[in-house]
Image: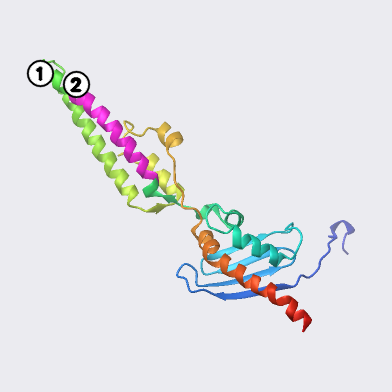
């Protein structure tokens, strides 16, 4: 016997959906299967990724008219309205080349400054025959070695092209070859401006699929009055 407390109250209704099968002549995305309904549900299974969103408050007019507007005007890729709705931050990766570029500048400036000071100290100590002349020379040689190892690490990270955020920061924080003389923890935590690629799958959808789908819907909406009249 079922306890009345265990009974779950519910309501339901069926929604008619339409599915569009699209073939695309693009190496970035070659096909898409998009399903929509007038409730505002949007689902896309594509060659460049799967995306879904629910625009249940899309305003007046039909959902197709709404999609024509946003896919035509606001689907220009990373940072666009449509991109913000369908993108997945976990698919965004670090652009190593663009991120390392300003680090090269900071590294060179810091190295020149330290090189000048250490070399001057070593020369003075040697000329005046200070008892600690060997220490000054050792400090100068150590600087050059640390600069060399730091340079090699920056170059190797740059050549990676793209990395996940976790992998990138792991290399920056855990790599003993990156000297604190040039990039200490405070620099990495607060001064490093990491450039992200964004969700490339969503970017491809916005730039390749969305405009085509908008045009398909636009043509369909143009034909609707003719179909109704016949």
- Give whichever of 149, 214 is nearer the camera: 214
Numbered range of the magenta stretch: 99-121
Name the spot of residue 67 as percent of width and height, x first: 66, 64
Classify 97 as above or below 48.
above
Image position of 2 (left or right of 204): right
Mark 2 is surrounded, within 10 Å at the Cα level, by few (under 14), some (14 to 19) or many (20 or more) other residues, namely some
Classify 156 as above or below 217.
above
Q: Quick check: is 104 in the magenta stretch?
A: yes
Q: CA distance from mark 1 to mark 2?
A: 10 Å
Residue at 25 percent across and 31 percent down: it is 112
- Give whichever of 13, 201 is nearer the camera: 201
Main secondary structure along the magenta-highlighted residues: helix
Q: Quick check: is 126 in the magenta stretch?
A: no
Residue position for label 1 = 127
Badge number at residue 27: none
Name the spot of residue 203 as percent of width and height, x first: 52, 59
CB-based contact (under 8 Å), mark 1 and mark 2? no
Figure label count? 2
Which residue occupies the extreme bottom position in the image? 230
Name the spot of residue 193 as percent of width and height, x first: 44, 40
Precedes in sequence: disc 1 or disc 2: 2
Residue position for label 2 = 121
Classify 179 as above or below 73.
above
> Helix or strand or loop: what does disc 1 sit on?
helix
Pick the quarter of the image with the C terminus: bottom right
Pick the quarter of the image with the N terminus: bottom right
Residue at 57 percent across and 69 percent down: it is 212
Q: Quadrant of residue 70?
A: bottom right
Residue at 32 percent across and 52 percent down: it is 159
> Helix or strand or loop: what does disc 2 sit on?
helix
């Amino acid at each position: 016997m079922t306890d009345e407390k265990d009974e779950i109250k519910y309501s339901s209704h069926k929604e008619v959906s339409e599915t569009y099968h699209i073939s695309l002549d693009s190496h970035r995305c070659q096909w898409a299967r998009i399903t929509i309904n007038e409730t505002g549900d949007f689902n896309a299974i594509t060659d460049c990724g799967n995306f879904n969103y629910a625009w249940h408050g899309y305003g007046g007019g039909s959902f197709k008219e709404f999609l024509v507007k946003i896919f035509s005007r606001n689907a220009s890729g990373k940072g666009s309205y449509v991109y913000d709705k369908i993108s997945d931050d976990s698919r965004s990766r670090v652009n190593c080349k663009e991120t390392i570029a300003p680090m090269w500048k900071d590294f060179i400036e810091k190295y020149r400054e330290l090189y000048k000071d250490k070399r001057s100290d070593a020369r003075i100590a040697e000329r005046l025959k200070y008892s600690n002349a060997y220490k000054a020379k050792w400090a100068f040689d150590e600087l050059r070695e640390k600069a060399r190892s730091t340079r090699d690490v920056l170059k190797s990270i740059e050549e990676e092209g793209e990395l996940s955020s976790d992998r990138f920061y792991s290399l920056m924080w855990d790599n003993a070859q990156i000297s604190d003389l040039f990039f200490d923890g405070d620099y990495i935590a607060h001064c490093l401006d990491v450039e992200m690629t964004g969700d490339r799958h969503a970017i491809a959808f916005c730039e390749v699929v969305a405009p085509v789908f908008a045009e398909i819907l636009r043509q369909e909406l143009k034909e609707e009055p003719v179909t109704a009249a016949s």
